[in-house]
Amino acid sequence: MPLPGRPDAARYGDAVTRSRRSGPALGAPLVLVGLALVAATTGWDWGRIPYAGGAALAAVGLVWLVATSVRPVLWRVLLGVAALSAGVVVAVLAVVGLPSDRPTWDDADAGALDDRSATTGGLVVTGGTARDVETGEEAWSHGGPDAEPLLVTADLVVLGTADGSLAVDPGSGRELWSAPVAGRGIAHDDVTLVVASTPSGGATEAVGLSLATGEVEWRRRGRPVMECDLGPADRFTPAREQAHVLVVPDEERSGRAGLLRVSDGAVTAADVDCLVAARVVGDVLVEVTGRDVRLVGRSAGDGRRLWAVPVAEPSGLLGGGPTLVAAGGGDDVTTIDTTTGRLSKVPLPTGVQRVLATTEVLRSDRVWLLVDRGDRAAVWDPISGKVADVPDAVTATVADADVGSGWLALSGTTRDLTGAESDRCWAVSPEGWVSDPVPGSDCRVAGGLLVADDEVHPVGE
């Protein structure tokens, strides 16, 4: 007499046997088809949807193989979940890569980082607040919500407030001195800071403040600026080191400006044409003048003409060092020696096809142009000849420039192994180091900080 339950057990054993036999027959083809679809997607750039479909088929096939080759139900479930999880993780990491271990912080609470921000000694000063560049944590704060940096150096930070100026030790945040002069920092010579001050109800004036004591050393009526660009031009940046500044009288209607010595406020040239373009580069005043559009170099010390050369695009001169760069796009790049006025046509480097983009506000000693190397984008310094690739860039353009420090922000796209493109940001240092791409479409830079969609990436070398 057959034992109770025996037929059911037999049927169960047969089902298990059939399942084990059919596991490889069904699971292996699913894995192979899925892997083939993944390979085809990466080989022919079909995009993320076919890639996801192939990865899903491979994962399902792998889970089926595991589930049909292991007898205990608990182990089937555990190993199946493990196989599925591993497949998903591998597929995702293959596309997005490993997570970055570089620190980031949110710019939303810190206020917008821009040209008026500057870095020193591991801190970034924005508004009246200094923050740690790695974490964004506040180190010290002075002056309230209306404060902004007038001068940022390794030894001294001068903040402008609603009713005056105050000097702060960068490391400790200790206040060193205060002065009843409010305005914007224009230039300094390590001894004197020139502030563009507009007293309440009064005319704009240039004021020289002692960096040691905050005492007023001299005053002169007029609007101090670092350059003229179809009139007086403000470049929103803390004061740069310069021995002379331009001052445009408030009542002046003819476009004439004067050249002032930072140390004592003395006028060294009183007939600078501010209607087109003029700026001080080292000890030379570079000025566009005359109906024939000539670039003229004059001594900042006494206004003597040193040289004059014809230029086609006088308003697009890049840089702030002894050599300026005129880049008209394509392959038309010329350097100008500000000491002698010598013009030099610079050929594109080997492999570079054309200049893609420039920025007219860059005023650092080094000038980096975005160029096309055929299969990739790169940056090129026509002065030194150095070329550096933009990592993984499919497209790229210049998004922002930090006027004073010389850092650039690039925006563009990268392509993952499926062929799908994603928005990315890069930072270019004054020395030509290019950061790895970070996610984002709104790209800005402040010193060694890259801001991508309000997330701050410390990218200093």
Image (spheres, grey):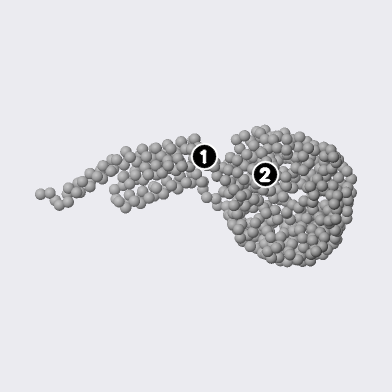
User: Type of residue at label 1?
Assistant: Gly
Q: CA distance from mark 1 to mark 2?
A: 29 Å
First-in-chain label (1 vs 2): 1
SS at circle 1:
loop
Q: Identify whether 26 is placed above or below 73.
A: above
Q: Is residue 42 left or right of residue 168?
A: left
The nearer-to-camera label among 1 and 2 is: 1
Counting other residues with Cα less than 10 Å from the Cα at mark 1, is it few (<14), some (14-19), or many (20 or more)? some
Residue 254: x, y in percent?
86, 49
On the image, which quarter does residue 203 sit in?
bottom right
Instruction: State how many labels appear.
Output: 2
Q: Residue at x 74, y 58 (%)?
A: 151
On screen, 19 above or below 216?
Answer: above
Give SS at disc 2. loop
Q: Residue at x 79, y 47 (%)?
A: 230
Q: Which residue is mark 2?
A: 432
Question: Residue 323, which numbered label?
Answer: none
Three-letter amino acid code of the residue under disc 2: Gly
Decide if residue 251 is in sight here.
yes
Task: Give whichever of 93, 334 is nearer the camera.
Answer: 334
Q: Residue at x 76, y 37 (%)?
A: 334
Nearest the eye: 85 or 72? 85
How packed mark 2 is, by other alpha carbons closer than 10 Å (few <14, some 14-19, many 20 or more), is: many
Where is residue 257 shown, x and y percent of the image? 85, 51
Can residue 192 be seen in the rendering of this structure? no
Residue 131 in percent (x, y) is at 65, 60
* The one of 191 and 355 positioned closer to us in this rendering: 355
Looking at the image, residue 156 sits to the left or right of residue 30; the answer is: right
From the image, tell me which residue sits under label 1: 419
Which residue is at 85% across, 41% downward? 290
Q: Seen from this angle, which residue lies furthest front? A: 253
Q: Is residue 102 left or right of residue 386?
A: left
